[in-house]
Image (tube, rainbow, N blue to C red):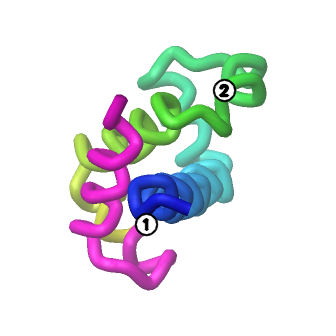
Amino acid sequence: MAPHETNAEAAATLSLGALSWVLADPERARRFLDVTGITPDVLRARADTPGFLAAVIGYLENHEPDLIACAESLQVGPEELTRARRVLERP
């Protein structure tokens, strides 16, 4: 497996963890849906796509307290989430 593929897989896994963190709290999940305009159907259909996963981290980056709380929950640094977003945004 090429290093880029491994990085993309790790980034996707981390991003899925971030999405799970967002959705684990009903109030936080509602805010995510309201702010992004994403419907539950779109969420289900796109939750495993790199662009969507990158957007989840971008959403967290727009509210630093959530980015930090999510990173702490996932036991990574916030910069690792940001790095994962950049990897997922690659063509």
Q: CA distance from mark 1 to mark 2?
A: 21 Å
Identify the amino acid type marked 1: Cys
Name above or below for residue 5 compared with residue 6.
above
At x 55% / y 57%, what residue is drawn? 9
Of residues 5 and 62, which is closer to you in this image? 5
Identify the amino acid type marked 2: Arg
Residue linked to disc 2: 46
Name above or below for residue 12 compared with residue 76.
above
Q: x, y (%) of residue 68?
A: 30, 68
- Quadrant holding the N terminus: bottom right
Residue extending farthest front? 1
Name above or below for residue 71 compared with residue 49.
below
Of residues 55 and 39, which is closer to you in this image? 55
Residues in magenta, as a range: 71-91
Name the N-terminal-most of marks 1 and 2.
2
- Quadrant holding the C terminus: top left
Q: x, y (%) of residue 62?
A: 24, 41
> Element type at marker 1?
helix
Assess whether residue 47 is covered by the magenta stretch: no
The mark total stands at: 2
Answer left or right for 5 relative to 81.
Answer: right
At x 50% / y 40%, what residue is drawn? 53
Residue linked to disc 1: 70
